[in-house]
Amino acid sequence: MRRDITALVFAALIIVMLAAAGVNAQSEIAWHDDQEGMQIAMSQNKPAMILFSSDGCPACAMLADELVDTRVINMSKNFVPVVGSRGLDRQYGIRYIPAIVFTNSQGEEVYRTVGYRDADTLVQEMQKAVESSDSPQTTQKQTPGFGVVTALISLFICGLWARRRHVK
């Protein structure tokens, strides 16, 4: 009888352990390559989370440690996780890594983080990205950037200089 009770307790422990493992079966983020991930995002009408990093980058390694946090993994289920590529870094104008670009399902950027973030901050920023991707996109009037304004002023000054030089 004692063996039966021991076997029953042992079986119950195994069942509890298997059930607990089944609750959080995803132990890491399931990353997709750029083309596959963006197609999945579009077909499922789901926002994407694009990670740009490098193997030799210390801040990228620290961020990778935060990406295995259970809270970050659970929050990542709101996105299609995509590993950024050379083509995507040009498309989104990535200059510094690590960077995470959050897009809507059509691939339009809605939020971005650059640099290392701890798990708490990363979860908060992922929540902001979810809210940004859920809100309807408003078309914003693009104002000329500093480079455009500088070029226009330079052209104006060159025109004045040329006119003075040739007209006496």
Image (tube, grey):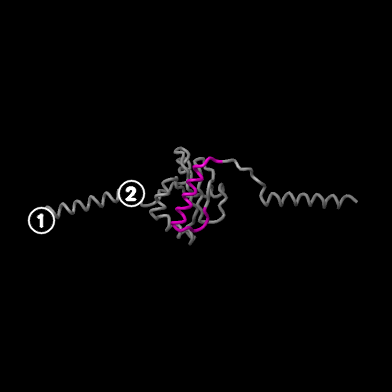
142 vs 126, left or right, is right
Q: Which sits in the foreground, 146 or 91?
A: 146
Residue 117 percent across, percent down from the top left: 48, 58
Mark 2 closeness class: few <14, some 14–19, many ≥20 residues within 10 Å: few
Q: Amino acid at mark 1?
A: Arg
Please give the residue where the numbered disc 2 appears in the rendered image: 25
**Above-or-below relation of 96 to 49:** below
Q: Amino acid at mark 2?
A: Ala
The total of numbered circles placed on residues is 2
For residue 86: magenta? Answer: no
Q: Residue at x 41, y 46 (%)?
A: 77
Give the residues drawn in magenta, as a range.
Answer: 113-137
Look at the magenta stretch and give its main secondary structure: helix
Q: Residue at x 75, y 51 (%)?
A: 153
Q: Which sits in the foreground, 150 or 86?
A: 150
127 vs 2, left or right, is right
SS class of the residue under badge 1?
helix
Q: Which sits in the foreground, 31 or 115?
A: 115
Please give the residue where the numbered disc 1 appears in the rendered image: 2
Residue 70 percent across, percent down from the top left: 38, 53
Taking the view exactly as shown, the residue that stands out farthest to the left is 1
Mark 1 closeness class: few <14, some 14–19, many ≥20 residues within 10 Å: few
Measure the alpha-carbon separation of dots 1 and 2: 34 Å
Residue 32 percent across, percent down from the top left: 44, 46
Can you tell which quarter of the image residue 65 is in? bottom left
Badges 1 and 2: C-beta atoms under 8 Å apart? no
The circle on residue 38 is: none
Residue 126 percent across, percent down from the top left: 47, 50
